[in-house]
Image (cartoon, rainbow, N blue to C red):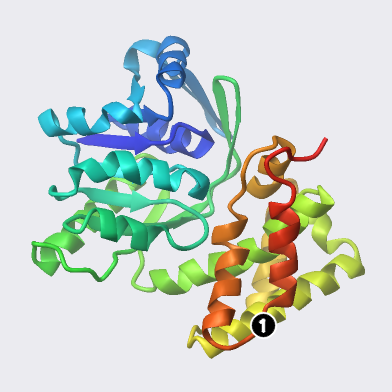
Amino acid sequence: MIIDIVGAGSLGLLYGGKLLAAGNQVRFWTRTSAQADLLSRDGVTIVERDGKIHIQPDQIQAKSLSELSDTWEHTPGEWLLLMVKQTSIDDSIHEIGILKDHVLNIACFQNGMGHLEKLEAALPHSLICPVITTEGAKRAQYQVTRAGIGETRVGRRNIHIETSVSIEDKRTFTLSRLLQQAGFDCTVSNEIDKLIYRKLLINAVINPLTAIWRVPNGELIIKEERKRFMRQLYDETWEIYSANGIQLDQDMWEQLISVCHSTASNTSSMLADVLQGRGTEIGSINGHIVRMAQKSGLAAPTHEILLHLIEGMQPEGVS
């Protein structure tokens, strides 16, 4: 089984490395040739609670993303796992979109919203599967440390492609089995849209506040002042969701607090981006909620303030 991993960050290397260790052929596609050369030269080590996986340089196939379309024309892969951030999604679609006349199986691991519609437009014949994961990993040079055991849920977009529904479902379950065999808690979900909006709400509350206050996730809930602001964001989102016919579990606030507990020591991706002076995913997270509110005739003042505050930090970040 040939699996293409677009994006060699911490999650891309975690999934790709474990899929490789499980006996699959994995090809990593990086933003630049220099990044691919470093990965091919140095290899990578995945650290888990029960041991380490050493991936030697001669096991790694890594190339610049600009070479993917030519390679795929001659040696197509079975699955493409798109693991770049939202900030890189347009560049990735530009390169992958060259294959618009082909049928690709693409699993999308992005936070936020908007990328699925872009992919559907650029690759109208392909199977686009949104993936929600609670897996976390930290990368330090050539070592990736897995942050506990998370859950991975794979869904399928209800779009027209030139195959029967049964074949689409078979492909999706094949990916789920591959990830299970590689050591991930992965299942196919019939409620992927609900999971997407659940994660959007959680990210919209946790990520920008940790980025502004520069604290790990667990620090959000140790002060009542912070929890009150979290609740204001939560209530604003709930009202916007209700106006758009989106229903989540009634105990969603308790679930949000639970996420802060279970990821207490984690540095959110938005905080990491701000500290490194990188662009963030604020536009596809809180910005998406603002746009939802506007379409339904509502206001989202708290989300809009956070959107402008985080955008104002780019690109120089904070010291």
Q: Quadrant of residue 262?
A: bottom right
Count of numbered tags:
1
Q: Residues within 10 Å of mark 1 (few under 14, many from 20)?
A: some
At which x and y percent is residue 133? 48, 54
Residue 317 lies left or right of residue 168; in this view the side is right
Q: What residue does disc 1 label?
A: 299
At which x and y percent is residue 66? 31, 29
Q: Is residue 24 visible?
A: no
Q: Quadrant of residue 288?
A: bottom right
At which x and y percent is residue 317? 74, 40
In the picture as drawn, the residue positioned furthest to the left comes out as 163
In the displayed structure, 144 sits above or below 300; it is above
* Quadrant housing the C terminus: top right
For the residue pair 174 and 2, the one nearer the viewer reads as 2
Mark 1 secondary-structure assignment: loop
* Quadrant housing the N terminus: top left
- Residue drawn at x 33%, y 17% is 59
- Residue drawn at x 69%, y 70% is 303
Q: Is residue 279 visible?
A: yes
- Residue drawn at x 81%, y 47% is 214
Q: Quadrant of residue 179?
A: top left
For the residue pair 136 and 39, the one nearer the viewer reads as 39
- Residue drawn at x 71%, y 57% is 208
> The residue under label 1 is which amino acid type?
Ala
For the residue pair 24 and 313, the one nearer the viewer reads as 313
At which x and y percent is residue 309? 76, 57
